[in-house]
Image (cartoon, helix red, strand yellow):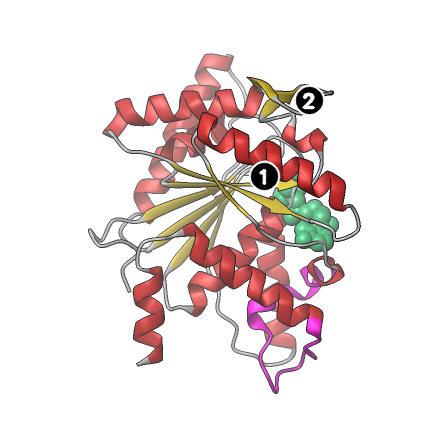
Amino acid sequence: MTGSKSGKTHIIVVGNEKGGSGKSTSAMHIVVSLLERGFRVAIIDLDARQKSLARYIENRAAYAEQYNLKLTMPDVHILERSEGGSTAEMEQQDEENFAALIEGLSGKHDYILIDCPGSDSYLSRQAHISADTLITPLNDSFVDVDLLAKVNPDTYQVEKLSLYSEMVWEARKMRAMKDRGTIDWIVMRNRTSALDAKNKRRVHDVLTQLQKRVAFRYVPGFGERVIYRELFPKGLTLVDFKSGGREKMTMSHVAARQEIRRLMDDLKLPGWEKAAVAAAE
Ligand SMILES: Nc1ncnc2c1ncn2[C@@H]1O[C@H](COP(=O)(O)OP(=O)(O)OP(=O)(O)O)[C@@H](O)[C@H]1O
Ligand SMILES: [Mg+2]
């Protein structure tokens, strides 16, 4: 299976400088969705302190072994920040390490998914510049929206862009200079709750305003569901839940699977639709 029509490895970056917005959880569900459709996927965990995505996958391998299951697995890489020397020297080293890793993986995989830490780093910027698709999960709160734009407290109008949007703007410029490439930026909501309809509506309105101004595509994403928190120790995703499998499917799980499927369709990744047709034949 080839990730894009041109056969080029497609780079997906999951990033947001806000910690705990659901980057690693979303990343894992995207990775397993791609693997299930037969794509070859490598992951790079740039959060070398927490290693949440790499650990999620370690748990998956252990669970598969324990119950003698055949679970799809990505190729896992963790890239540490370089240490020692001046800031300029460390940045130079980071840049070289990042480029070497991408070059080594390109061509061998259809997709490379990079999970970024919840704070700014030079490596994370390199990842953003290389992204073909950038996915930013956002919790349903104005604390999260604040990293994209300052919002007027009375009118909820967008006043100016803030840190993260400016960083993506810079990354887009750098990318255009590097290889004339473009970054398809998707902002997805995560942990939306049916309980706080007013806030949900306001966040929706602000993101709708912002998407034109900052040039991202705003998509619904995932609801708040206990199951997302429970899956990590087993290394499973909702994509792995199958009828007759070890895990019991509830109505909430069915709804969650639909959310994931919808997100995957919304991402418009190269080869995604075609792979579905091929699998059905
Ligand atoms: N849709 C959801 N419903 C319920 N819980 C969720 C959902 N998405 C993520 N979580 C939980 O929220 C917490 C943070 O999620 P996650 O680790 O994916 O975020 P992150 O952005 O990668 O964090 P960090 O910035 O620390 O890397 C985890 O405990 C996770 O299980
Ligand atoms: Mg994470």
Q: In terms of secondary structure, where does tag 1 sit?
A: loop
User: What amino acid does circle 2 point to?
Assistant: Thr
- Image point (57%, 34%), residue name: 207
Q: Where does label 2 land, which residue?
A: 155
| Displayed-image quarter of ligand 2 | top right
Position of 253 compared to 114: left or right?
Answer: right
Quadrant housing the C terminus:
bottom left
Q: Secondary structure at mark 2?
A: loop
Residue 119 placed where, x, y %? 61, 29
Q: Which residue is mark 1?
A: 47
Q: At 30% from the left edge and 65% from the top edge, which residue is drawn? A: 274
68 to 171, vertically: above or below: below
Q: Up-down: is 234 above or below 96? A: below
Quadrant in the picture for the N terminus:
bottom left
Dominant secondary structure, magenta: loop
- Tell me the magenta residue range: 230-251
Q: Based on the displayed image, in which of its 4 quarters is residue 156 positioned?
A: top right
Q: Nearer the viewer, mark 2 or mark 1?
A: 2
Q: Nearer the viewer, residue 259 or 279?
A: 259
Q: Is mark 1 within 8 Å of ligand 2?
A: yes
Q: Residues within 10 Å of mark 2 (few under 14, many from 20)?
A: few
Q: Is residue 123 left or right of residue 278?
A: right
Tell me which amino acid carries mark 1: Asp
Which residue of the protein is positioned furthest toward the front in this rendering?
Answer: 155
- Residue 262's spot in the image, x, y percent? 50, 59
Q: Distance from label 2 to label 1 (Cα)? A: 37 Å
Position in image of residue 180 (x %, y %):
24, 29
